[in-house]
Image (spheres, rainbow, N blue to C red):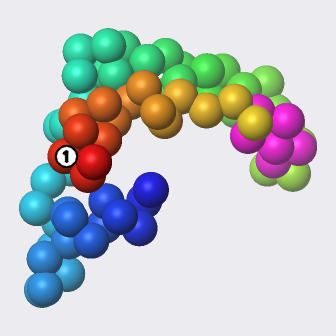
Amino acid sequence: MKAELDKLNITDEGKRRARFHQWLTGEGRTILTRQIGKVEGIMEMCDDIEYFKRVTSRQKAITVAPYLFDEINRIID
């Protein structure tokens, strides 16, 4: 999905037309804010980067991405 978004969002000069967070719905912004808070909380609990990587690797199966980009998904379809 990111590759498709980059095709739509990056100009020939390599600049971005828009930032992804600007396309979020109100619900998407709420979900993103919560996700950032969760990651910050995990970071605070971890003693080092390796432990952080182990903890977050378990989280990779869970994603909020389909809900964050509702508007973009309609544009691509």
- Left or right, 44 with reference to 49: left
Q: Specify whether residue 55 is in view.
A: yes
Residue 30 in the image: state x and y as whole percent.
Answer: 36, 14
- Which quadrant of the structure image shows residue 22? top left
Q: Is residue 56 magenta?
A: yes
* Secondary structure predominantly adopted by residues drawn in magenta: helix
- Residue occupying the point 42% across, 26% down: 67
- Which quadrant of the structure image shows residue 72? top left
Residue 66 in the image: state x and y as whole percent.
Answer: 47, 33
- Which quadrant of the structure image shows residue 21? top left
Q: Is residue 59 magenta?
A: yes
In the image, residue 21 sits, relative to residue 15, either above or below, namely: above
The furthest residue to the front: 77
Residue 1 in the image: state x and y as whole percent.
Answer: 44, 56
- Residue occupying the point 14% across, 53% down: 18
- Left or right, 55 with reference to 24: right
How many numbered circles does the render carry?
1
In the image, residue 34 sits, relative to residue 74, either above or below, namely: above
Residue stretch in magenta: 53-60
Neighbour tally class for label 1: few under 14, some 14-19, many 20 plus, Cα within 10 Å = few
Front-most of residues 53 and 18: 18
- Which amino acid type corresponds to the residue marked 1 in the rendered image? Ile
Q: Secondary structure at mark 1?
A: helix
- Residue occupying the point 24% across, 15% down: 26
- Left or right, 31 with reference to 17: right
In the image, residue 74 sits, relative to residue 39, either above or below, namely: below
- Residue occupying the point 20% across, 63% down: 9
| Residue named by callout 1 | 75
